[in-house]
Image: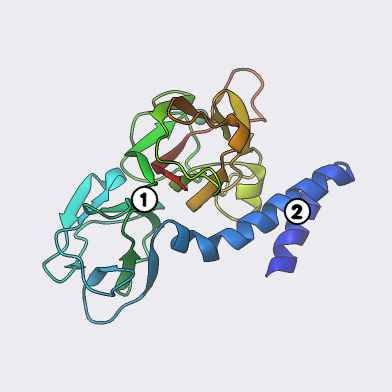
Amino acid sequence: MYKRLISIVYEKQNNNFMKKFLSLTVLIFYLILPCCSATFQGGVYEQGSGNASRIIDKQTGEGIGGAQINLPKQNYATKTDANGFFELDTQINGPSIMSVQKGNYKPFTMTVNGNTFNAPIVVGIEKSNASDLALDANMYHLGDDSYSDLSANAGEFRMQAIGPFYTKRFTLKKLNLSKPIYLVIGSIIGIDTAMARSMGQNKIPNAFASPPEVYFNGNKISEIQLNGDGQKIKLPPNLIRKNQINEITIKTGRNLMQTAYIDYDDFEFMNLIIEN
Ligand SMILES: [Ca+2]
């Protein structure tokens, strides 16, 4: 599978070697992500049994009662019972973000689709650490509300775009600067980059967008090439302002095949956490 994906990327790139090399590096990085994402964000999930899905404590394996489960795109919310079991009474047609929240636990999100709940699943969530900072548990839509039905974002209930960028200011305290500090983006859906297209995340034949960019204290620190859960971006230590105000900005890309006007890439993200 890896060889096939790599060859797809190579076929799509007719540019110079450096660009190919960079794409390959980024691709390998994201291929590794899915196996690790669940762990660092605090969640693991596996196939369950019986009729209902379940939220458990990742450490103890015990069911978590009263956990809040939200699907913002469906405008749907429910809670787990005393033993952590829940059932979703809503239709999921396209990729959607499901969040799980419970006091003392890290806010958790995962991307679900119409097949996720064909059989019940078990989701393990993790207690939060003192040095973690839950920046923003809400869902945001960046872009201009104009996009193709073939876009990776084409779903059912839509949130209105807040514009081409998102900014959050926060103070970093209790940091252990000898350990790496990461921005974790819980879930992202709707990015239409060339790489997202080559990975089958959308079906737009003739257009793609530049990747969204992440800025930290005014410096570009990353580009986001793919949709997915638990994407982790290292904050450069020299840019961190301890005990002072720091700023994260996420800017959406633009449709590179549209030159007559600016068509921002429409995508949604949810759940920003600083992990140390
Ligand atoms: Ca757009």
Residue 12: x and y in percent read 77, 49
Q: Judge left or right: residue 91 versus residue 263.
A: left
Amino acid type of disc 1? Ile
Residue 102: x and y in percent read 22, 54
Q: Earlier in the sequence, mark 1 or mark 2?
A: 2
Hey, which residue is sitting farthest top in the picture? Answer: 261
Dot 2, how many residues are within 10 Å of its Cα: few (below 14), some (14-19), or many (20+)? some
Residue at point 38% right, 35% down? Answer: 140
Looking at the picture, tell me which residue is in the foreground, 214 or 163.
214
Q: Which residue is mark 1?
A: 97
Amino acid type of disc 2? Leu
Task: State yes or no: Cβ of the residue under disc 2 lies below 8 Å from any atom of ligand 1.
Answer: no
Dot 1, how many residues are within 10 Å of its Cα: few (below 14), some (14-19), or many (20+)? many
Residue 251: x and y in percent read 53, 28
Residue at point 59% right, 55% down? Answer: 200
Residue 122 vertical placement versus 264 (above, below): below
Looking at the picture, tell me which residue is in the foreground, 58 or 167.
58
Residue at point 21% right, 73% down? Answer: 52
Looking at the picture, tell me which residue is in the foreground, 251 or 114.
251
Q: Which residue is mark 2?
A: 24
Residue 224 vertical placement versus 103 (above, below): above
